[in-house]
Image (cartoon, grey):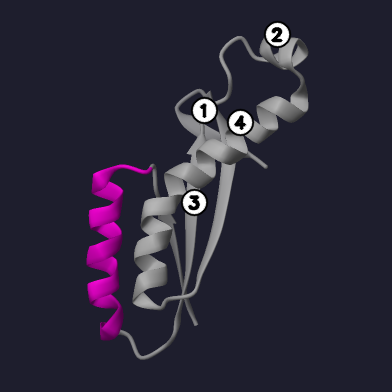
Amino acid sequence: MLKWLVPVDGSDSAVRAVSHMIDKMQWFKQPIEIHLLNVQHPMPYGNRVTSAVGHDKVAQYHHDEGLAALAPTRAKLDAAGDKVRVSHRCGRSCGNHRQIRP
């Protein structure tokens, strides 16, 4: 089974890329497992915001924003009848690369 990791940000470009991917899926004989990933930026001022509003509210905010960003591309894949796994993370910049934390 092939696995594709597709980073999406909720933009029109991401939706077009997924549409293009759906069109090309028939090229493959094996079933394809699609994983959509959205990475949210952490709250500015880090722990200050978390201590002011609470960790649960910040986590819920990231959860809601992640699902909202994934919704257009997920709907496109659902309409095509493809099975998809969805995940969202909160990441922070660390030098020249991204660190992702669950």
- Residue kind at label 3, given as amino acid type: Leu
Decide: marks 2, 3 in contact (CB < 8 A)? no
**Which residue bears the numbered disc 4?**
61
Q: Secondary structure at mark 2?
A: helix
| Mark 3–mark 4 distance (CA, rounded to whole Å) | 17 Å
| Image-quadrant location for residue 75 | bottom left
Residue 29 covered by magenta stretch: no
SS label for mark 1: loop
User: How far across and down, in percent of the image, does residue 51 sit?
Assistant: 77, 12
User: Residue type at mark 2?
Assistant: Arg
- Measured as percent of width and height from the top left, residue 86 is found at 54, 58
Give the residue at mark 3.
37
Task: Identify the residue at horizontal 43%, vertical 43% (top origin).
Answer: 69
Q: CA distance from mark 2 to mark 1?
A: 15 Å
Q: Residue under circle 2? A: 48
Q: Residues under labels 2 and 4: Cα distance?
A: 15 Å
Q: Is 26 a magenta residue? A: yes
Q: Amino acid at mark 1?
A: His
Is residue 76 shown above or below 28? Answer: above
Distance from label 2 to label 3 (Cα)? 27 Å
Q: Quadrant of the C terminus?
A: top right
Density class for disc 4 (Cα within 10 Å; few <14, some 14-19, many ≥20) is some
Bin the neighbour count of mark 3 within 10 Å (Cα to Cα): few under 14, some 14-19, many 20 and up.
many
Give the labeled residue for mark 1: 41
Measured in 3D between alpha carbons, the distance from the residue under mark 3 to the one under mark 1, in whole angstroms, is 13 Å
Residue drawn 24% across and 75% down?
Answer: 24
Q: Are marks 2 and 4 in contact (CB under 8 Å)?
A: no
Residue 8 picture location, percent across and down? 39, 48
Q: Which residues are magenta?
A: 10-27
User: Circle 1: is it few (<14), some (14-19), or many (20+) Cα within 10 Å?
Assistant: few
